[in-house]
């Protein structure tokens, strides 16, 4: 309702700075993208949509269990989330130029797949996003010398201790692979 009201506000006519984040781990992600596109069309707006895989999986699952839900509002396996992310990426690219697609990922497969999907659709106005300190080598291959020159927005969390500590813990949980910096901290050879 809030997003619909903002998009309908005539004072924002001609402004392309409104953005929304959609989490692909949610089973409602594609219908949400369809709704955003329809609203942008209806109100003659161009909006930015940032696609992320999702950050609150554990919380969503726990909440659904506490409420006694028979089904979860999120995909419960990584491969289904990954697949939905690519399906949503395809939908975003198809919605261009009404939607300015933004893809937040540090996953090499996702980057390569989106790059191919965009090229096949003839879409050139989109961007990737990465967290400061993550995925630098991967993105250097895509946007650096010899790359296709796709924009990459680098973002960093800003805030007080109370806000940043939960953010850091969430990032550590989602990036617990052997290649993460946490595992390297205790390796004296690095």
Image: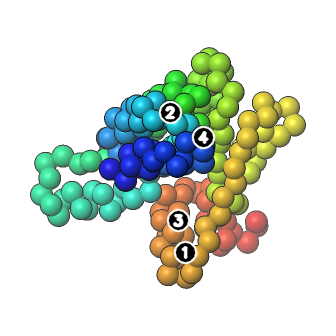
Instruction: Choose the circle earlier in sequence order: 4 or 2.
Output: 4
Instruction: Choose the circle earlier in sequence order: 3 or 1.
Output: 1
What residue lies at 54% left-to-right and 70% top-to-bottom?
168
Mark drawn on residue 44: 2
Question: Viewed as shown, does residue 166 lie left or right of 117?
Answer: left
Residue 79 in view (yes/no): no
Instruction: Choose the circle earlier in sequence order: 1 or 4.
Output: 4
Residue most extreme to the bottom: 161
Q: Quadrant of residue 93?
A: top right
What residue lies at 65% left-to-right and 73% top-to-bottom?
186
In the depicted view, which residue is nearer to us: 48 or 116? 48
Q: Which residue is mark 4?
A: 14
Q: CA distance from mark 3 to mark 1?
A: 12 Å
- State the image coordinates of residue 25 (x, y, percent, origin top left): 39, 45
Q: Are marks 4 and 2 in contact (CB under 8 Å)?
A: no
Considering only vertical position in the picture, is 101 above or below 171?
Answer: above
SS type, badge 2: loop
Q: Which residue is mark 1?
A: 164
Mark drawn on residue 78: none
Question: What is the tally of numbered marks visible in this picture?
Answer: 4
Q: CA distance from mark 4 to mark 2?
A: 8 Å
Mark drawn on residue 172: 3
């Amino acid at each position: 309702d809030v997003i619909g009201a903002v998009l309908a506000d005539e004072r924002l006519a001609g402004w392309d700075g409104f953005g929304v984040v959609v989490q692909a781990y949610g089973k409602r992600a594609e219908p949400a993208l369809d709704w955003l596109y329809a609203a942008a069309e209806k109100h003659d707006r161009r909006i930015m949509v940032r696609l992320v895989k999702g950050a609150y999986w554990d919380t969503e699952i726990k909440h659904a269990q506490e409420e006694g839900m028979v089904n979860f509002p999120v995909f419960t396996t990584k491969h289904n989330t990954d697949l939905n992310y690519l399906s949503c990426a395809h939908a975003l690219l198809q919605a261009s130029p009404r939607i300015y697609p933004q893809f937040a990922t540090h996953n090499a497969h996702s980057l390569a797949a989106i790059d191919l999907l965009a090229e096949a659709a003839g879409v050139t106005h989109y961007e990737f996003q990465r967290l400061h300190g993550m995925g630098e080598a991967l993105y250097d291959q895509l946007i650096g010398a010899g790359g296709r020159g796709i924009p990459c927005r680098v973002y960093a969390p800003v805030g007080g201790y109370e806000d940043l500590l939960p953010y850091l813990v969430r990032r550590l949980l989602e990036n617990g692979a052997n290649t993460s910096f946490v595992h390297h901290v205790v390796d004296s050879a690095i």
